[in-house]
Amino acid sequence: MAITKQKKSEIVEKVRDIASKAKTLVFANFKGLTVAQQSEMRRALRAQGIGYTVAKKSLLKRGLEGKFQGEPPALEGEIALAYGPAFAGASAGKDDELAPARELAAFVKKFSGGLAFAGGVFQGKYVGKDGIISIAAIPGLDVLRAQFVYTINGPIQKLAVVLNEVAKKR
């Protein structure tokens, strides 16, 4: 069934709104996903404050044109847009620019036959498929903080053990 001009303009406006407010956009090719798999993914993404929408490629391109630097990635197949988290009323604690790519990466692994990265936008620039995969591999802010604390604590803990052993010998 064909989409009316009014509906097309609403979709383009929605994409423009998303592009102006979201910090990160991820394009995903979702060909072959069942309705149940898409529903599961949407629920999980929504719980993390990440939006997910599907639109025709031509309408996506029209809504994104002139908004970001660089060359947009080639969008082939059926394309969805994951965005967030500073959009759609996400809480202040979920202000993680990498969240859309990282959360979607979990589903790319889970549904490897039906879901794949196609590119995205990060820090105002178009990023290709490989760039989004790299961004998705970066751990969350809490994990990075824990790794930092562990790295700082390691030498201090070793020094304390050595000083304790010296004190026992004396």
Image (cartoon, rainbow, N blue to C red):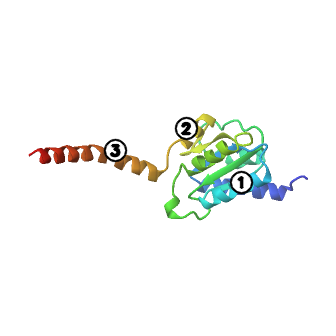
Distance, label 1 to label 3, CA atoms, is: 40 Å
Q: For marks 3 and 2, give the CA distance.
A: 23 Å
Can the viewer see residue 85?
Answer: yes
Find numbered disc 2 in the image and state the secondary structure of the residue it sits on: helix
Marked residue nearer the N-terminal end (1 or 3): 1
Contact check, label 1 and label 3, Cβ < 8 Å: no
Q: Which mark is residue 134?
A: 2
Q: Residue at x 70, y 44 (%)?
A: 111
Question: Helix, strand or loop at disc 3?
Answer: helix
Q: Is residue 123 left or right of residue 47?
A: left
Q: Is residue 65 visible?
A: no
Residue denoted by label 3: 151
Disc 3 + disc 2, Cβ < 8 Å: no
Q: Residues within 10 Å of mark 2 (few under 14, many from 20)?
A: few
Q: Which residue is mark 1?
A: 53
Q: Quadrant of residue 36?
A: bottom right
